[in-house]
Amino acid sequence: MDYEKTNSVLLSGTVSSSPVFSHELYGGEKFFNLVVDVQRLSGVVDSIPVTISEFLMASSKLNFDKGAPIEISGEFRSHNFEENGRSKLILSVFCKDVAERTDNLDVNQIELSGFVCKPPIFRETPFKRQINDILLAVNRPFFKKSDYIPLIAWGRNALFAKNFRVGDKVGIVGRIQSRRYNKVIDDVPYEKTAYEVSIQDITNYEEKIESHLNYDEPGLTF
């Protein structure tokens, strides 16, 4: 991992949802949302939201229609969105460069360096699988803003992160995963999608300890 990078994403996959207008900046630059499908070695597909500038799309001269092969590099960003009086954390990959995918190899890589901003939530499933949920604050150096990225660690990586404290600086390597779940609102079931970073490798800078475990949970192949 290049520890000078605080937020770096590389995706290589297939467009599964064509660009839809998202918002416009004061200067007139428009941004669009699309979805890129990236398949894991296990065959599971992660559907990852991407935000891209109209200028970048126009200059690339690529096909952004559904089914088009694509390679995206950028940053995983967050922002808060008010919905029904509640604040919701919205996550997407902010595209900084785009190219046509030149081979059939799907890639889903993310490197983050940031600060633990909530006490980790460690738990075990009924099948004795250890899981740890971590919320990482990743600073944007030139914008005086932070992105809040949910992380999930498995097995020995979960145990390693069990004693992380708020304020600890950590670095991770992993992949972005999408997870569908059902939520009942006013007695009506809705299908929702959650996004998080599944950790493959983790470092605690505060303790100068690294964990290069490459832990492979069943069904979670990187």
Image (spheres, rainbow, N blue to C red):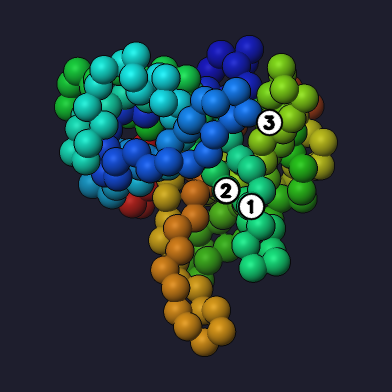
Graded by Cα atoms within 10 Å as few (under 14), some (14 to 19) or many (20 or more), the crowding at tag 1 reads few
| Residue where numbered disc 1 is placed | 81
Marks 3 and 2, the one that precedes in the sequence: 2
| Badge 1 element | strand
Front of the two marks 1 and 3: 1
| Residue where numbered disc 3 is placed | 138
Q: Quadrant of the C terminus?
A: top left
What amino acid type is highlighted by mark number 2? Ile
Residue at x 77% of width, y 50% of height: 119
Nearer to us in this view, 211 or 12: 12
221 in relation to 218, above or below: above
Front of the two marks 2 and 1: 1
Identify the disc placed on residue 189.
none
Q: Is residue 94 visible?
A: yes
| Badge 2 element | strand
27 in relation to 36, above or below: above
Image x and y of residue 126, in percent = 51, 71
What amino acid type is highlighted by mark number 3? Val
